[in-house]
Image (cartoon, rainbow, N blue to C red):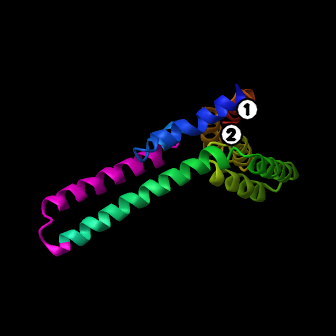
Amino acid sequence: MGRIAALFRVLVPLTLSIVPGWGHIWVHRYNRGLSIFILTCAIANARILLYLNAAEVEYNLLYNACLAAIAGLYVFTFVDIIRLTVWLKGKTVAKRRRGQYRRSLVLFLRGEYEAAAKQAQRMIRTDPLDSSALMVLGMVQRESGDLKKALSTFRRGLKTATSDYWHEDLKREIEVTRERM
């Protein structure tokens, strides 16, 4: 059953990526997915309009440029979906991220809030849906006195938590932050 679920987790977004952007929406990267889809529609629309006026040479060059841009978007979409579904879920990356989480937590416990925040932001840059990184970043923001940002970060972490592992911790951190407000 585990192999089927893993295969499903990869094949569905790849199949949806036939329409650029839909695979990103499936894996909860809504802004990126909508941006890719809108850009593809705009370029396709320009390509159609240029095709209707294809008699002149400069229109042919623009038409070919639109085709190249759409091909580039397709390649980017498929490569990015593979990165999001296979690479980020791989054992090597998971091991590295556990190490990054431990480092950020140790820095936080030492009181080195700026370094802990940088480490957590590095993790978030790799995977914006990482609940553990969002929790550490929220704790750093709370201890630094930025309660509104901390509350927003905890809520984002709670919303993006894909498993129940971090739910209770994030709820508790939200309550603690509300009490300090």
Q: Which residue has dot 1 on it?
A: 166
Q: Which residue lies at the image location 13% right of the left edge and 72% below the top edge?
A: 56
Question: What quarter of the picture does the N terminus occupy?
Answer: top right
| Highlighted magenta segment, given as a residue range | 29-58
Q: Position of residue 141 (x, y in %)?
A: 69, 48
The residue lying toward the viewer, choosing from 147 and 61, is: 61
Q: Residue furthest bottom?
A: 57
- Secondary structure of the residue carrying numbered label 1: loop
Residue neighbourhood size for the residue with mark 1, other residues' Cα within 10 Å, grouped as few (<14), some (14–19), many (≥20): some
> Is any part of residue 56 visible from this angle?
yes
Q: Position of residue 158 (x, y in %)?
A: 64, 33
> Is any part of residue 162 visible from this angle?
no
The residue lying toward the viewer, choosing from 76 and 117, is: 76
Location of residue 61 (image quadrant): bottom left
Q: Position of residue 42 (x, y in %)?
A: 29, 54
Q: Which residue has dot 2 on it?
A: 131
Q: Position of residue 174 (x, y in %)?
A: 68, 32
- Amino acid type shown at disc 2: Ser
